[in-house]
Image (cartoon, rainbow, N blue to C red):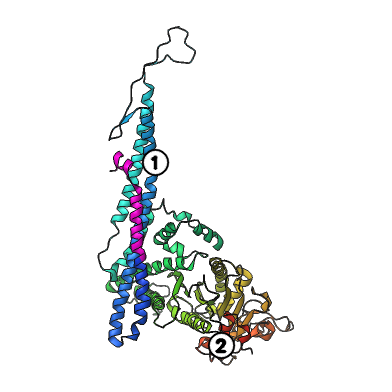
């Protein structure tokens, strides 16, 4: 119970100072985690092989996780102490004002909040006998009594408010503890701890103040209005909301999304453990007693159990792939930044090689069919190969390449694949939903960089990813790109390159012949391209009425390619990769045209 003396003499700067101390520990934990990842795990292969390497790697990965846990938990403690110091300012100020008013009236206040006041001379009765109508005779009630009662109520209210704040934060902080089992349970506990602090510090770090549905520029303006301490606290307490805000610096989004990744991973690991150690449902066979055939629509609990287990395993595999990129062991590769993460559905992952905020050249790679969290490694490798080749181009360019698995991509490309008679990649719905998300992300990249002229921006699409780029260009809000590279495009929904959101002459295309890559031809069949004005006499259903970027009539710059299939355009030391890198770095004269 907070007393008058305690609240009056409270030095809130001690809470703020303690918060600063916990912040320092949190920051050291983050720095140590990064050092373990980049300076130890990434170089482990140079000194260890075989079993030794695997054993040491497991230990170092656990050490990295421990440091990140310290970073997360200490960040929560820091936010709680800052919130406590901030919120106690109100009741302390109210108490001091009430005490000052009492002193001015020469009232005394005891330790329990009782207010004593000096008696005044009672009002004299009206002896004239001429009492004004409606005005009662003066009584002997002391006018100081009402003043004292009002001050006592103010004191009680201030103490009540302080006790509520103290209890709220005390309960939350008491729950921030570990059982020492970081490998199995504590990362799941971090998510619960975060919710506790969100509840306790809700008046200090208001989630409602975080922009929702705003433009990247509005997001950036809000972020810029915060102090450095407030930014760090918002990352600790509301990491998912901060990590998803387009327009914020890459460093802030990376820190927030790594926390989200670790928390979600801990939760999924615990769910998988509970599933596998719990009872396994038996297979059920529901047979129609008349026909003897299986009944349709009957739920099979074992099948449901297996599907859930596979989903958890797949999502955890994707999370591990991202974690592996943080610990990539190749010398000279830039730091990875996690600009977006979500495990729901097929999952989302936006990973940058190098900081796009400071790069002279930025390439955003949009993958196509089968892009999802569990397959993140495949697309991250393509983006990484593009970084390697771009970084090696003449002029020692500063480059960042971003893998944008930021939309729900189609998962089937052939008839009857995955149980779909009509492949998902033939539908425009995926591109339509991706378009505004891609436009907003690209606007956010530009905003964080400092404007449209701060970096040379290239948007690179592969397969259905080019369709999403085309949709974003004409329907989603635009791209703001300096160059567009369409790789093996099935169509971009326009009939000519000049309709896309890039300067005239800055749309590029590369695609292998139809015997090696059938996607461009397939895109014409399902009408993902644009109408060809040169063939109006043909049936609208005829594929020849469609333009795709690899058609010369489309008007893109056609580049040479040596890919042998639909996925080989990022093969190291290939002509295909060289041409993409030449465009990304603005070395247009080095492009090998077809």
Q: Residues within 10 Å of mark 2 (few under 14, many from 20)?
A: many
Q: Is residue 193 above or below residue 296?
A: above
Q: Nearer the viewer, residue 314 or 298?
A: 314
Magenta stretch: includes residue 88: no
Q: Find residue 290 and report its horizontal and vertical position in percent.
A: 39, 77
- Distance (Cα) linking label 1 and label 2: 68 Å
Judge by depth and name the residue closer to the eye, 485 or 12.
Answer: 12
Residue 532, picture quadrant: bottom right
Magenta portion: prevailing SS class: helix
- Relative to 130, residue 561 above or below: below
Q: Which residue is mark 2?
A: 576
Q: Describe residue 410's horizontal placement relative to residue 538 as left or right.
A: left
Q: Is residue 47 visible?
A: yes
The answer to whether the residues at label 1 and label 2 have Cβ atoms under 8 Å apart is no
Tag 1 secondary structure: helix
Range drawn in magenta: 1-27
Q: Residue at x 28, y 69 (%)?
A: 182
| Residue 93, numbered label | 1
Q: Nearer the viewer, mark 1 or mark 2?
A: 1
Q: Which secondary structure lies at badge 2? A: helix
**Residue 5 among magenta residues:** yes
Depth check: 304 or 31 in front? 31
Q: Quadrant of the N terminus?
A: top left
The x, y position of residue 591, in whole percent, is: 61, 86
* Residue 347 in view here: no
């Amino acid at each position: 119970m907070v007393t008058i003396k305690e609240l009056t003499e409270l030095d809130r700067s001690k809470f703020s100072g303690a918060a600063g101390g916990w912040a320092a520990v949190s920051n050291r934990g983050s720095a140590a985690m990064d050092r373990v990842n980049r300076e130890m795990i990434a170089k482990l292969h140079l000194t260890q092989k075989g079993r030794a390497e695997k054993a040491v790697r497991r230990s170092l990965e656990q050490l990295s996780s421990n440091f990140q846990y310290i970073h997360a938990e200490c960040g929560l403690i820091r936010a709680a102490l800052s919130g406590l110091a901030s919120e106690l300012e109100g009741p302390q100020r109210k108490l001091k004002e009430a005490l000052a008013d009492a002193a001015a009236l020469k009232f005394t206040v005891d330790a329990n909040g009782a207010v004593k006041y000096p008696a005044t001379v009672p009002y004299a009765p009206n002896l004239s006998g001429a009492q004004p109508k409606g005005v009662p005779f003066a009584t002997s009630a002391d006018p100081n009594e009402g003043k004292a009662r009002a001050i006592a109520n103010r004191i009680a209210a201030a103490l009540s408010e302080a006790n509520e704040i103290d209890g709220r934060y005390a309960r939350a902080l008491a729950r921030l503890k570990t059982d020492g089992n970081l490998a199995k349970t504590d990362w799941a506990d971090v998510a619960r701890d975060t919710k506790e602090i969100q509840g306790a510090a809700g008046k200090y770090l208001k989630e409602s103040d975080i922009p929702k549905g705003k433009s990247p520029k509005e997001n950036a303006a809000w972020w810029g209005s915060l102090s450095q301490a407030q930014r760090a606290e918002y990352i600790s307490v509301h990491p998912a909301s901060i990590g998803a805000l387009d327009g914020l610096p890459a460093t802030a989004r990376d820190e927030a999304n790594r926390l989200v990744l670790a928390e979600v991973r801990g939760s999924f690991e615990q769910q998988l453990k509970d599933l596998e150690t719990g009872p396994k449902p038996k297979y059920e066979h529901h047979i129609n007693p008349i026909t003897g055939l299986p009944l349709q629509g009957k739920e099979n609990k074992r099948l449901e159990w297996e599907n859930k287990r596979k989903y958890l395993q797949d999502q955890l595999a994707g999370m591990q792939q991202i974690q592996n990129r943080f610990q990539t062991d190749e010398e000279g590769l830039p730091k990875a930044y996690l600009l977006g993460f979500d495990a729901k559905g097929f999952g989302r992952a936006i990973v940058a090689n190098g900081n796009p905020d400071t790069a002279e050249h930025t390439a955003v790679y949009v993958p196509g069919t089968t892009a999802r969290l569990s397959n993140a490694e495949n697309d991250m490798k393509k983006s990484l190969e593009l970084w390697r080749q771009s970084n090696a181009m003449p002029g020692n360019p500063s480059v960042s390449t971003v893998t944008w698995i930021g939309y729900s991509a189609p998962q089937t490309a052939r008839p009857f694949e995955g149980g779909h008679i009509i492949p998902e990649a033939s539908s425009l719905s995926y591109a339509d939903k991706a378009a505004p998300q891609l436009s907003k992300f690209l606007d956010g990249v530009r905003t964080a960089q400092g404007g449209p002229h701060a970096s040379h921006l290239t948007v690179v699409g592969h397969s259905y990813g080019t369709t999403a780029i085309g949709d974003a260009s004409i329907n989603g809000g635009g791209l703001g790109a300096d160059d567009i590279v369409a790789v093996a495009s099935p169509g971009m929904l326009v009939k000519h390159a000049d309709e896309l959101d890039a300067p005239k002459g800055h749309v590029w295309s590369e695609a292998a012949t139809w015997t090696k890559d059938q996607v461009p031809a397939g895109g014409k069949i399902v009408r993902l391209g644009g109408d060809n004005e040169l063939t109006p006499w043909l049936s609208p259903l005829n594929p020849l009425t469609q333009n795709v970027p690899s058609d010369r009539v489309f008007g893109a710059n056609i580049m040479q390619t040596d890919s042998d299939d639909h996925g080989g355009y990022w093969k190291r030391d290939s002509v295909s990769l060289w041409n993409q890198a030449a465009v990304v770095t603005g070395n247009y004269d080095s492009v090998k045209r077809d």
